[in-house]
Image (cartoon, grey):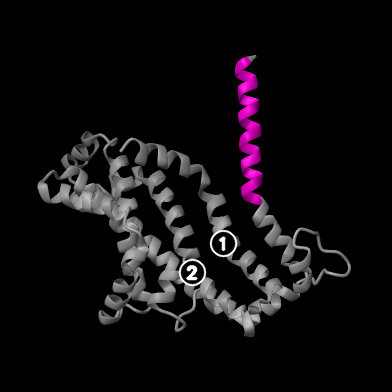
């Protein structure tokens, strides 16, 4: 009886926390269908006959922000950045874990240390360096995201690889696989839960990132967070209806990606970062 009561209490607490987190998103959704003046005066009311605008906020937001162009650049940068992070950091983690040595240990701890360095400490020097090296473009920013995402990703992959028996790799080598084949045909498929977890975490970060693209590529290649800023008018006025609509559209791809991959995230975190 005590265990059932404890489970019910835990369920109620978690349900309450879930509602707290979902509530702001719900408010954004209902306000995306209201006129801008109603949003400012009554943000928590449902749309009614006087305040409902249909899809007008969405059409205005798409027109004023160049949403589809921004969506394309956000999608391009996110997909290729996440792919680069997953591929290169998984190989790095495998090498660091399997090949022992002072340099590899130093590299591992340097990557782990990079996770605690605030971005604000390096953002100005980083943006200047990116400009000097010609990385201030959609291709260059992928390399920058790879650098910033390497610390956490290598840490998670390394923790998971430590749980993979070395005998599996030795058996593949005896069967005639070279180093490249051992990793891609044996090790990487085993890393699938952690790889998806790393992909989810980095996708949510890169897709929603405003500061790094603004500093590196600016207005030349607007991503969605940058494009949304164009809804600001003169004297600090903001078209709140269109802003809410664009926020809803920007959230949808990440939510879909997360729902399709969520079953791997607990398994990946538990098997990788915790055991590492």
Instruction: Verify whether residue 18 appears in magenta.
Output: yes
Q: What's the magenta region?
A: 2-22
Q: CA distance from mark 1 to mark 2?
A: 9 Å
Q: Quadrant of residue 37?
A: bottom right
Left or right for 25, reference 104: right
Q: Which mark is residue 165?
A: none
> Closest to the observer: 7 or 75?
7
Residue appearing at x 58%, y 66% in the figure: 250
Quarter that holds the C terminus: top left
Q: Is residue 221 above or below residue 52?
A: below
- Secondary element at image label 2: helix
> Closest to the observer: 118 or 53?
118
Q: Main secondary structure of the magenta part?
A: helix
Quarter that holds the N terminus: top right
Q: Which mark is residue 253?
A: 1
Residue appearing at x 62%, y 66% in the figure: 247
Instruction: Verify whether residue 116 appears in magenta.
Output: no
Outermost residue to the front:
235
Mark 1 vs 2, N-terminal side:
2
- Residue 255 location in percent, x, y? 58, 56
* Residue 257 appears in view: yes
In this figure, which residue is indicated by the disc labeled 2? 75
The reply to whether callout 1 and callout 2 are in contact (CB within 8 Å) is yes
- Residue 253 location in percent, x, y? 56, 62
Outermost residue to the left:
102
> Closest to the observer: 144 or 185?
144
Residue appearing at x 69%, y 79% in the figure: 60
- Residue 31 location in percent, x, y? 73, 64
Outermost residue to the top:
1
- Residue 133 location in percent, x, y? 25, 79
* Residue 233 appears in view: no
Determine crowd level at label 2: few under 14, some 14-19, many 20+ residues with C-alpha closer than 10 A. some
């Amino acid at each position: 009886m005590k265990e059932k009561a404890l489970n019910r209490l835990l369920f109620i607490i978690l349900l309450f926390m879930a509602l707290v987190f979902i509530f702001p998103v719900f408010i954004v959704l209902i306000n995306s269908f209201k006129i801008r003046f109603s949003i400012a005066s009554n943000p928590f009311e449902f749309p009614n006959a006087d305040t409902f605008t249909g899809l007008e906020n969405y059409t205005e937001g798409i027109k004023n922000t160049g949403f589809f162009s921004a969506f394309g650049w956000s999608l391009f940068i996110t997909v290729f950045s996440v792919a680069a992070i997953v591929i290169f950091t998984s190989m790095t983690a495998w090498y660091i874990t399997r090949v022992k040595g002072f340099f590899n240990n130093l590299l591992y701890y340097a990557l782990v240390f990079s996770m605690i360095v605030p971005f604000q400490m390096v953002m100005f020097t980083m943006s200047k360096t990116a400009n000097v090296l010609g990385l201030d473009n959609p291709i260059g920013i992928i390399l920058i995201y790879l650098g910033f995402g390497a610390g956490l990703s290598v840490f998670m992959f390394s923790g998971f690889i430590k749980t993979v028996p070395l005998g599996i790799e030795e058996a593949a080598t005896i069967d005639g696989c070279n180093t490249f084949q051992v990793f891609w045909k044996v090790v990487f498929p085993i890393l699938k839960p952690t790889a998806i977890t790393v992909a989810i975490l980095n996708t949510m970060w890169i897709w929603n990132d405003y500061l790094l693209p603004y500093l590196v590529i600016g207005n030349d290649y607007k991503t969605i967070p940058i494009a949304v800023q164009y809804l600001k008018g003169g004297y600090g006025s903001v078209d709140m209806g269109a802003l809410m609509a664009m926020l809803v559209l920007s959230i949808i791809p990440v939510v879909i990606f997360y729902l399709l991959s969520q079953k791997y995230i607990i398994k990946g975190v538990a098997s990788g970062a915790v055991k590492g």
